[in-house]
Structures are given as structure tokens and as C-alpha cells.
Image: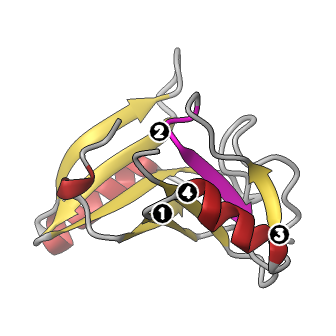
Amino acid sequence: MQNQQRYQTVVPYFMVLNAPKFIEFTKKAFQSEVVKIDKLEGTEGVVHAEMKIGNSIIYFADTSADGSCGPGVCGEINTDGLIPIQMYIHVENATDTYNKAIVEGATPIFEPSEQSGYMGGFVDPFKNLWWVQSKN
């Protein structure tokens, strides 16, 4: 499980069409530093990466032109286009936050559980994708 002390509460999650080029751009423009990168097994596709810019962390991953955010990750989201940014939020209780969002009209992506590292995802009524995670 991630060390939540290391991250700010809200972490922007960029979905990009070419993660290596995104890395090079941010290195040159913002003197970024990649601190973690996970690739899809057997490919160069980035399924999750973390970058430090100044005193902030951002997450990013490769996407496709149709807006999908990874094989089997986002379910059947119909966004009518690219999802360029998502939000990843560290909360006190991911299950409670997830359930409150669903009651308020969010579409479930997957429910937080111990198996998922207490991380869950949902799409709000405005078509924004949110990931919530807690220690339990």
C-alpha cells in the first residue's frame, strides 16, 4: 500500500496519448522527476506512473484516442471522447466515500475492497472519473 504521508490529498491523474513524450515534455518544461513507472506486461504502454513537479506529485498513464483508461480498468464508461484527466483522492474511508458518491448519482467502476488496496473508482454525474483510496 502506498505511503499516504507522501502524497497530497488530491492527485491529478493525466491520461496521455504518449507517456514517453509526456515525460520528456514535463522534464524539459518543469524539471519533473519520474518516481514510479509501471508498464503493461510485454509492452511499452504505461498503466500507471508518478511524477514529481516541484513539491507536488501527479499521476499519469497512457490512454487511447477513444478515451479508454486501460484494459479492464474503467469498465464501460461512455465518455464520448478522451478522458484527459482524472482525480485520485486519498480519503479517510474509501468505502464510505464511494458509497456516498453512488447515492449522489455516480456510476460505479469498481468497489473498494481489501483486495484492491482499499481503492475504488466511480464516474460522477458530470462524466469525471474519480479514484478514491484509504488505508482501510
Whole-angstrom CA distance, mark 4 to mark 3, is 24 Å
Q: Is residue 29 left or right of residue 72?
A: left
Residue 81 visible here: no
For mark 3, give the secondary structure: loop
Q: Amino acid at mark 1?
A: Tyr
Q: Position of residue 29 (x, y in %)?
A: 19, 73
Q: Amino acid at mark 4?
A: Ala
In the picture of the structure, the residue carrying the numbered disc 1 is 88
User: In terms of sequence position, does the residue under pointer 2 or pointer 3 come before the other?
Assistant: 2
Residue at point 16%, 62% (across, down): 32
Whole-angstrom CA distance, mark 1 to mark 4, is 11 Å
Whole-angstrom CA distance, mark 2 to mark 3, is 21 Å
Please say if the residues under marks 1 and 4 sit with CB atoms less than 8 Å apart. no
Between marks 2 and 4 in the image, the one whose residue lies nearer the viewer: 4
For mark 4, give the secondary structure: helix
Q: Position of residue 2 (x, y in %)?
A: 31, 42
Give the magenta-colored segment's residue range.
Answer: 116-122
Query: Mark on residue 46?
Result: 2
User: In terms of sequence position, does the residue under pointer 2 or pointer 4 come before the other?
Assistant: 2
Please say if the residues under marks 1 and 3 sit with CB atoms less than 8 Å apart. no
Q: Amino acid at mark 2?
A: Val
Q: Is residue 105 left or right of residue 82?
A: right
43 over 28 or under it: above or below:
above
98 or 47: nearer the viewer:
98
User: In terms of sequence position, does the residue under pointer 1 or pointer 2 come before the other?
Assistant: 2
For mark 1, give the secondary structure: strand
2 over 58 or under it: above or below:
above
Q: Say few, some or many: other residues with alpha carbon within 10 Å of mark 3 (under 14 / 14 to 19 / 20 or more).
A: some
Between marks 1 and 3 in the image, the one whose residue lies nearer the viewer: 1
Please say if the residues under marks 2 and 3 sit with CB atoms less than 8 Å apart. no
Q: How is the image coloured?
A: secondary structure
